[in-house]
Amino acid sequence: MKTLITLTVNGNKHEVNVDPQTPLLYVLRNNLELNGPKFGCGLSQCGACMVLFDGKANPSCLITVERAAEMKITTLEGLADKNGNLHKVQQAFIDEQAAQCGYCLNGLVIASVGLLNEKPNPSDEEIQAGLYRNICRCGVHARVIRAVKKASA
Ligand code: FES
């Protein structure tokens, strides 16, 4: 049965009329038209759908919209400031060309922001550990690590 749920996404309140058990990812993409988070596996295993929950990066494909309503959600679309200036992680990914096909990019950028929120100056090992839930089949990992290092400087 559909219910009115209020979500806080990118600093804005949104009311959505959905089944409370709907995965947050579907609501972000289909109801709010926020297509930064991607559908990859749908099983919380690839990281493509990551968003920030109260500043911490986690997949959005299994958490229900009902549970997500308790937290402040930030998607890729909410990282730039009000003037359109990119987040330092986004800029570092561009500077280091840390993308190939781009499908995993949302998850890697969000996970990197979440990592830097917790560890502002991570070592290479901490970056690898922090991004372990993000699968990239193109193999740009070395460039991703350089980008996160650059953003942490
Ligand atoms: Fe959510 Fe893969 S789509 S982790």
Image (cartoon, rainbow, N blue to C red):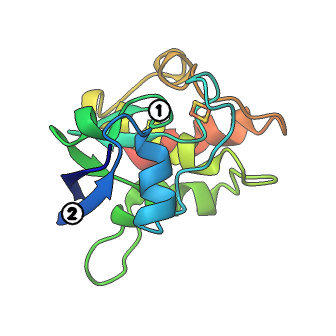
Q: Amino acid at mark 1?
A: Pro
Q: Secondary structure at mark 1?
A: loop
Using the image as rendered, state which of residue 38 and residue 27 is in the foreground: 27
Q: Residues within 10 Å of mark 1 (few under 14, many from 20)?
A: many
Which residue is label 1 attached to?
59
**Do residues under tags 2 and 1 come within 8 Å of each other at their CB atoms?**
no
Tell me where residue 95 sits by quadrant.
bottom right
User: Mark number for residue 30?
Assistant: none
How many angstroms separate mark 2 from mark 1 (CA)?
A: 21 Å
User: Mark number for residue 15?
Assistant: 2
Please state, as top left, top right, bottom left or bottom right, where the C terminus lies in the image: top left
Query: In the image, 75: left or right of 12?
Result: right
Residue 132 is situated, as x and y percent measured from the top left of the image, at 58, 19
Query: In the image, 118: left or right of 37?
Result: left
Q: Amino acid at mark 2?
A: Glu
Vertical side of 23 occupied by 36: above or below: below
Residue 128 is situated, as x and y percent measured from the top left of the image, at 57, 20
Q: Residues within 10 Å of mark 2 (few under 14, many from 20)?
A: few
Q: Is residue 153 at least partly visible in the picture? A: no
Query: In the image, 86: left or right of 133?
Result: left
Q: Secondary structure at mark 2?
A: strand
